[in-house]
């Protein structure tokens, strides 16, 4: 039997829910929204699957994510993949060095 992932559990502790979302889920939503506002393209996921409850965020894939976005600068602790193309290893290393990690 083939199983497919529809949502992923967040690693952050589920605190009080506000309008149906935990603090962790709101944080992940803000990261995705920030990346899209800065020019990233959302290909998959990005918001809770209808009818689900609990501390979950769906697997999410974004491309063309700007390095200045919070998604690239902060850890997400969620099933979010941010992809950015680079011309070579030197550019990749330079971009990695722009983060505090």
Image (cartoon, helix red, strand yellow):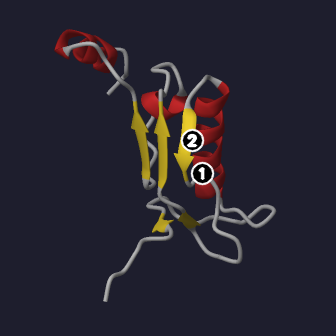
Q: Is residue 84 above or below residue 1?
A: above
Few, some or many residues within 10 Å of mark 2 (<14, 14–19, 20+): some
Marks 2/1: CA–CA distance = 7 Å
Is 94 left or right of 27, judged from the image as shown?
A: left
Seen from this angle, which residue lies furthest bottom? 1
- On-image quarter of the C terminus: top left
Q: Quadrant of residue 91?
A: top left
Camera-nearest residue between 3 and 26: 3
Q: Is residue 12 above or below residue 100?
A: below
Is 17 left or right of 35, judged from the image as shown?
A: right
Q: Is residue 51 above or below residue 80?
A: below
Tell me residue 94's x, y (percent): 28, 11
Camera-nearest residue between 83 and 34: 83
Q: Residue at x 48, y 28 (%)?
A: 65
Q: Residue at x 21, y 13 (%)?
A: 88
Q: Is residue 90 above or below residue 84?
A: above
Label 2 SS:
strand
Is 7 left or right of 32, judged from the image as shown?
A: left
Q: Residue at x 57, y 69 (%)?
A: 55
Tell me residue 46's x, y (percent): 60, 51
Which disc, if any, is residue 17?
A: none
Tell me residue 61's x, y (percent): 47, 46
Label 1 SS:
loop
Q: Quadrant of residue 15?
A: bottom right
Tell me residue 22's x, y (percent): 66, 62
Seen from this angle, which residue lies furthest left? 89
Which disc, if any, is residue 46?
A: 1
Seen from this angle, which residue lies furthest right? 19
Few, some or many residues within 10 Å of mark 1 (<14, 14–19, 20+): many
- Camera-nearest label, 2 or 1: 2
Do the residues under discs 2 and 1 have CB atoms within 8 angstroms?
yes
Residue bearing the label numbered 2? 42
């Amino acid at each position: 039997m083939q199983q497919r992932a529809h949502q992923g559990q967040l690693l952050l502790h589920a605190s009080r829910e506000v309008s149906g979302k935990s603090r962790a889920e709101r944080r992940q939503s803000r990261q995705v929204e920030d990346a899209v506002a800065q020019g990233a393209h959302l290909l998959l996921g990005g918001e809770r699957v209808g009818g689900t409850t609990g501390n979950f965020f769906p697997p999410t894939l974004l491309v063309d994510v700007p390095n200045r976005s919070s998604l690239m600068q902060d850890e997400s602790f969620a099933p979010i993949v941010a992809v950015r193309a680079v011309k070579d290893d030197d550019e990749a290393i330079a971009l990695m060095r722009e983060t505090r990690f």
